[in-house]
Amino acid sequence: MTALPASGREWHLVARPHGWPKAEDVALREVPVTEPGEGRILVRNKHFSVDPYMRGRMNDVKSYTPPFKLDHPMDGGAVGEVVASNADGFAVGDHVLHGLGWREYAHVPARYAVKVDASLAPLSAYLGVLGMPGLTAYAGLFEVASFKEGDAVFVSGAAGAVGSQVGQLARIKGASRVIGSAGSDDKVKLLVEEYGFDAAFNYKTGGSVKEQLKKAAPDGIDVYFDNVGGEHLEAAISSFNLHGRATICGMISQYNSTEAAPAPRNLAQVIGKRLRLHGMLVGDHQALQPRFVKDVAGWLASGELKYRETSVEGIGSGFDAFLGLLRGENTGKMIVTLN
């Protein structure tokens, strides 16, 4: 067996942030690397994911997933190479997807690791277009929002890993119109010119979201995929046609707020328009995984579905990558790539 390094680095949460996370809330620590115990594998991570939901896990509040523990490594999606195995079915050299990111080396219980094929797609893709964000888009559009051919679809945060895939899937499946919002002119251009959105707007500079959406969707919308919340959700409610459906996936505009958001202020319209606002967690839709992988792999192979990644190099850049994600500095999936 190849000799293992004596130590590796991992990011620990050391304080609960109030508002925006700060450098003093985390610490990059060096810890020993040991042989895996029975039923475990040791993985050298090659990429790990930073995602908006992780901000909520920094708070000590009851939620759908446990908070990060203080003075322990944070976790999240990661993909890497097995460098030592004490588990049947896994050999040194296998590539696996698992949930112990934010570190260079991970001791992973074998039952929580899934082999992935690096010849079918780049390893980082299993954290994005073929991973949790991709399944979120697929399930949120087709199962939660009950998308049907001819629907007009609005996606907020549309240049991110989830939003960009939602808009393209709607286009592939016959949406009458696909509209996206993004936080820069370059992202707006990407949505229209590369991803095939019918219209997109810059919510930071183009005026109110409500007015920009009405201009982009003069005949209203039938489906809204919400990654932002706040003003975006209020605008969508205003533009909904009768029996509109919203998938409430994320509310990144509020994750670092210390005061309650004022919007949406038009919830009464939910009654008259008979709207359906449906919160979603991707973990509830794992049964779709085989169909999702089959469909998306086919659309990737045909060139119908495109994706982008923003890769930040080095374990030491992990926390900065997370802050960049919260500021919207990524295009597509934000990935931390380890040497």
Image (spheres, grey):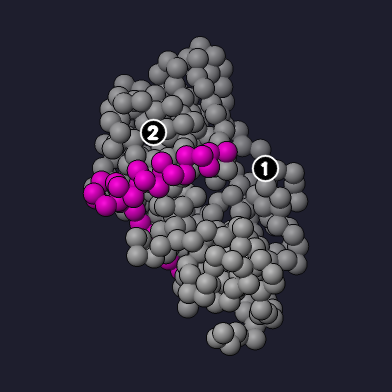
**Start-end of magenta stretch:** 284-312
Type of the residue with mark 2: Phe
Residue 32 counted in the magenta span: no
* Res 230 → quadrant: top right
Q: Tell me where residue 274 appears, x and y as whole percent.
A: 50, 15
Alpha carbon separation for disc pair 1 and 2: 26 Å
Residue at (40, 52) in percent of width and height: 129
Residue at (68, 79) in percent of width and height: 34
State the predominant SS element of the stretch in magenta. Answer: helix
Q: Tell me where residue 240 appears, x and y as whole percent.
A: 42, 22
Q: Using a 10 Å C-alpha cutoff, classify the residue at mark 2 as few (fewer than 14 neighbours), some (14 to 19) or many (20 or more).
A: many
Q: Nearer the viewer, residue 294 or 236?
A: 294
Q: Using a 10 Å C-alpha cutoff, classify the residue at mark 1 as few (fewer than 14 neighbours), some (14 to 19) or many (20 or more).
A: few
Q: Tell me where residue 54 appears, x and y as whole percent.
A: 61, 54
What residue is disc 2 on?
154
Residue at (26, 42) in percent of width and height: 196
Q: Tell me where residue 187 appears, x and y as whole percent.
A: 34, 51
Left or right placement of residue 305 versus residue 242 in this view: left
Q: Secondary structure at mark 2?
A: strand
Left or right placement of residue 46 versus residue 19 in this view: left
What residue is disc 1 on?
64
- Give the position of the N terminus as an image quadrant: bottom right
* Res 7 → quadrant: bottom right
Q: Is residue 59 above or below residue 156?
A: below
Q: Which mark is residue 291?
A: none
Q: Nearer the viewer, residue 247 or 8?
A: 8
Q: Is residue 6 above or below residue 125?
A: below
Q: Is residue 183 above or below residue 249?
A: below
Type of the residue with mark 1: Tyr
Q: Secondary structure at mark 1?
A: loop
